[in-house]
Image: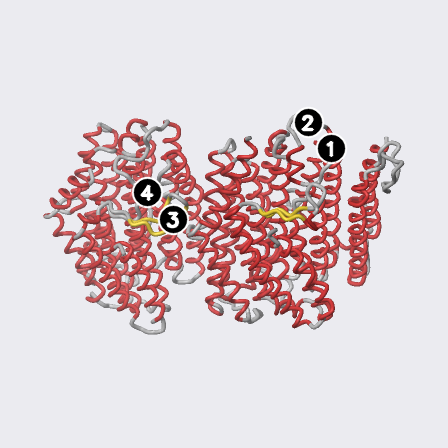
Amino acid sequence: MNQLPVLIIVLPLLIAPILLLVRDNRHVYNLSLGVSFLNILLILILFQDVYQNGNILYELGSWKAPIGIRLNADLLSCYFLLLINFMAFICLIAGNKTIKSQVEDDNIHLFYIAWLLCNVGFSGIVLTNDIFNLFVFLEISSLASYFLISQGNYKASSLAAIQYLFIGSIGAVFILFAIGILYVNTGTLNMTDLSNKIRSGSISLSMSLSIAMFLIGVGIKTALFPLHGWLIRTYSYAPSIIVSYFSGTSTKIGIYILLRVFLDIFNSINPLEYYNLAQLILFLSLIGVLLSTLYAIKQNEIKKMLAYSSVAQLSYIIIAIMLLTPDGLTASLIHVFNHSIIKTGLFLVVTVLFINNKNVSIGDFSGLGEKYPLLMSAFVILLLGLIGLPLTSGFISKWYLISAILQSDYWYISGVILITSFMTFFYAWLLIEKIYFSARLNHDASVATSYQLLCVYFLAALTIYLGVDTSLTFGISEQISNNFYSTINQ
Amino acid sequence: MLFVLNMILFLLGLFIIIRESNLIKKVIGLNIFQSSVFIFYLIISKVDGGVPPILNDDQLIYSNPLPHVLILTAIVVGIATTSLALALIIKVKQKYNSIEEHELDKI
Amino acid sequence: MSILLSHILFLAFGIVIIYLLRKETFTGVVSIFISLASLVYALYIISIQDILINQKTDIVNIIPGIPLSFSLDYLGVIFLVISNGLWLMVSIFSERYLELNKYQNKPKFYIFFTLSMLATNGIIYSSNLLTTFVFYEILTIATYPLVTFKGDKKSIINGKKYLYYLLGTSIIFFLPAIIFTYILTGTLDYKVGGIFTSYNNTAIYILVILYLFGIAKSAVMPFHKWLPSAMVAPTPVSALLHAVAVVKSGVFIMLKVFLFIFGVDVLTQSGANIIIILFASFTIISSSFIALNQDNIKLRLAYSTIGQLSYIVLATAILAPYSILAAVLHLIFHALGKIMLFLSAGIIATQTGIKNVSEMNNLSSKLPITCLLMTIGAIIMIGLPPTIGFISKWYLLLGIMESENLYLLIVIILSTLLNASYYFPMIYKSYFEKAKFDYKSPSCEDMPLAFPVIIVGFIAVILFFKTDFIIKFITENII
C-alpha cells in the first residue's frame, strides 16, 4: 500500500508536539520549515503518481472501508493539497521576520506549532474519504486558526479571533448536524459509500435538511455572501503573514468542501440543480461581487481592500461552480489556483513592507516605486494579475470564466462580471498611482530580507508563468471537472 | 418528539449566540448549540430495546456504538473550542476591559 | 527562429539596452539606432514578404488551442512600413525636442516609447485575435507612462481617463467579443473571407457592436474621450502614438476584424455594416464640430484625428472594393499628414511657446518652413489636390457611388467643409494676419528639429505623384 497520503498528514502532526519540547524559536522555525518542505516533496511525488495511475486509497490501520477510515488521494485532492502546502511553505519562508516582530516572543514557538496543526487540518480535509473525519480535520484547522488570528498585534486581534470562533463553530456544528442526518439516512460515513447509497429517488425531508445545513456550514467557510463578514474582520486584524497564508488556503478549503459534498457525495441527487440552489447561490454571489468590489474601492486600509477583493474573487469562483457545467467547474478550479497565488503575493508584499505598521493605508505606498523598483514591479504584476490583463494568470481565469458563462444558461450575467472585473482596476490603480506618481515618499516602509523578496518575486513570476503556460492549471482542472461531470451524467 | 425537543435546543443555542452581547453568554449558547447536536447523535444511535454494545452471547439487540464514538470526538472538539474561547475572552477583557460586544464594537 | 519573432525580440532587447544605459545621456541616440534597425528589419521583412505571407509562427499556447502566434499579411506590410518609418522620424525629432524642452528622465521616455512600438509591431504581426488582444493591452499600458510623462496633476488626471477608457472598453467589450467569437466559430485566426461559416444575424449584430465599442483605440464615438486626454503628453508622443501607432492600431484591428473575422459577405448579408456606418458618420460630423471650437492646436488636431479615423472605419464598413482601397490608402496618408501637423505644432510650441490657434498670427515670418509643412499637412487632412489626401477621398467617393449609399456623400461633403473651416484659419492666421503678441524669443527655425518633418513632408509630396504602386499593391493583394 502506498504510504504517501498518510505520511503527509502524520509527519507534521508528529512534529508539532515535538516542537513543543524544543521551544527554542530558531530551531522551531527551522524544523517547521523543513517539515513543510518535506511535505511538498511528498505531495509532488503523490501528485505524479495520482496523475499517472489514478486514485490512491489508503486504509488507516488496515481497517477496510466503510468501517475503517480511508484516505483517498484523487486529482482534486492533490490539486488543493499542492496549493495549500505550497502556500504554507512560501509564507513560512517569508514570515520569519514579521512573526518575530509581530508575535510576542514567548508565543512564537506556539505560533509555529499552531501553523503546522492548521496545515495538518487542511491537508486532512482534502485527503480524507470519511466525512466525519473531514469534520474533525476542519475543527483541527479552525481551532489552530483561531489561535493564529488572535496573535496579531492589533488591539482587536483577540476580538476578531473570538468572533471568528463563534461563526466558525456555528458553521462546524451545522456541518456536524448535517453529517448526523446523512448517517441516519444511509448508515455510512465513507464518502464513496455515501455517494453510492444516496439515490436520486430517495430524497426525504431529512435529506433536504442535511443539504441545507451543509450549505450554511460551507457558506460560512467560503465567505459566501452574505456570510462574509468574518473574513473582513479576520483579514484586517490577524498577523499579516497569517492573512497571506489564509487568503490562499482557508477559503479555498471551503470551496473544496463545497465541491466534495455537493458534486461528489450528492452527485446522484445533484442538489444544486434539484432545489434550484445553484440559482440562489449564483445571484447571492453576484450581489456579493458587486457590493464587495464597491466596498473595496471605498477602503483606504489596504488589508481591508484586499479582503473585500478576496470576497469578490471567491464569489467569481462560486459563480463559476454554480453554472453547473464542466466548463464552469474548470474555470473555478483554475481561478482557485491563480487567485491564491496572486492574493497571497499581494498580502506578502504588504507583510514584508510594513512589519510594524498596524493600519497600512493606500497612502503608505507613496513613492515606493522609486525606493523599491523591483519589489514594486512585482507588486504591480500581481495587481495586473488581479485585474486580469493578458499574460498574467488572472487573464486565463477570466477567459474561462466568461467563456463558461457565455455558454451557460446565465449568459446575461456576463455583463456584471465584466463590469466588476473592470472595477477591480479602479482600486488596483489607486495603489499603482500612489506607488509611482506620489511626490511624498513614505519612509516607514521596512527593509525586506532577501528571502522575503525572493518569495514575492517567485509568486509574481508564477503569475506570469501561469498566464502563459496553462498546462498545469487548465490541464488538471479540465480533467477533474470531466471526471466529476461524467459521473454526474451517468 | 425527541427530535422536536432537540431542534428547539438547537435553535435556542443558535439564538443565544446571535442575540447575546455578553461573550461569556455567547460561549454558553455555543455549548448549548453543540450539545443539541451531540444529543441528536445519541438519539439516532438508540435502538428500541437495545442494550449497551458489550459483546455478550445473550443479547442480540444493542444500540449503535458508532455515533457514541463519533460524538466522543466531537465533545473533545467542543471542549477545546470552549476553552480556547474562554482564553480569548480573557485577552479581550484585558485589552478592552469589557466583554459586552456592543461596547466593544464602539471602541 | 522566425524573422517576425526576432524583430519583436530585437525590440525587447533594445528596451533592455536602454534600461541598462539609463544613467547615460546618449539613450536618445541609442533609441534612434533602434528605430533605424527596426525600420531596416521592416524593410527586410517586406523584401522577403512572398515567403513570409501567411506563414504562422506559434510561440506559446496561451489558451489551449489558441496560441500566441505571429504571421504577416499584406495589410500588415503596409502598416509595418508606415509605423516603423515614422518611428525613425519621430525618434530623431524627439531627441532634439526633449532636449530643447528640458524634459527630465529621458530613459523612461525611450523605454516606454520602444515598448509601445514593440506592441504596435506585435499587433501588426499577430495572426489571431488573442495575440492582437495581448499586444493591444500592452500598448495601452506602455503608452500610459508617456501620457503622464510630465507628472503634473493635469497629466495624471488625464492619464487616468486615458486608461479608464481604453482598458475599460477592452475589458468590457473587446474581450467578451473575442470569447464570443471563439465560442461561435472555434477559431480566432484571421482568414481572408472571414471565419464565420454559419451565423445568425443577432449574434453578428451583437458582435459588431462589441467590436466597435471594444476597439476604442479607433476612437469611434462614444468612446473617443481618451484621445483628447492623451494630448497632455509631450508632442512626439501625440504625434507618433496618438496620431499613428495607437489609433492606427485600432483602425488596423478594426479592418482586420471586419475583413478577416467577419468577412465582407457576412457583414453585407446580415446588414450589420449599417451600424458601423451610422456610428462612424456620426463621429465624423460631430468631431468636426467639436474641433471647430477648440483653440488649443493639439486638441483641434486630436478631434480632427477622431474624425479622420472614422473615415477609415466608414470606408471599411461600406465594404465596396474601392472604399476598402480608400480605407487602406487613408491609413497611410492620414498618418503622414497628421504627423506633420503634430510635429509642426510641437516645433511651434517649442520655438515660440504658442499653443493656441488664436495666437498664431503671422507665424510664418518666424517659422516659414514649419508653417509650410503645417499647411501641406492641413491640405492633406482636408483632402484637396494636389496632395495625397485627395486620392484617398477620391476613392472613398468612388466607393460610396459603387455601394449606392449616396446619402453618405452628404456626410463626406459636410465634413470636408468643416475640415476646411477649422484648418484654414490656422493657415490664414499664420500667413496673413498681423501679430498681436511679441513672441517669447525671436528665434527662427531650428533645423535639427525641423529636419525629420521636412523629410516626411517631402515623402508626402512625392507620394502624390507615385501612388499607383501602392494602389496596385492593395488591389492585387488585399481586395
Q: Which mark is residue C61?
A: 3
Do residues under tags 3 and 2 come within 8 Å of each other at their CB atoms?
no
Q: Nearer the viewer, residue A191 or C28?
A: A191
* Tag 3 and tag 1 share a subunit: no
Count of marks overlaid on the render: 4
Residue that carries the numbered disc 1 in the rendered image: A185
Q: Is residue C222 above or below residue C344?
A: above
Report which quarter residue A266 is drawn in.
top right
Instruction: Residue type at mark 1: give it.
Output: Asn
Left or right of C54: which side holds A58? Answer: right
- Look at the numbered discs 4 and 3 and tell me whether their residues touch, using CB distance below 8 Å: no
Residue at image mark 4: C287
Q: Position of residue A217 (x, y in %)?
A: 69, 42
Callout 3, which amino acid?
A: Asn
Residue C459 as seen in the image, left or right of residue A87: left
Q: Position of residue C351 (x, y in %)?
A: 26, 65
4 vs 1, front mark: 1
Chain of the residue where label 3 is placed in the rendered structure: C
Is the residue at mark 2 from the same chain as the one at mark 4?
A: no
Q: Which residue is mark 2?
A: A202
Q: CA distance from mark 4 to mark 3?
A: 41 Å
Specify the farthest residue to the front: B57
Which one is earlier in the sequence, the residue at label 4 or at label 3? Answer: 3
Asked if labels 2 and 1 touch by Cβ distance under 8 angstroms, the answer is yes
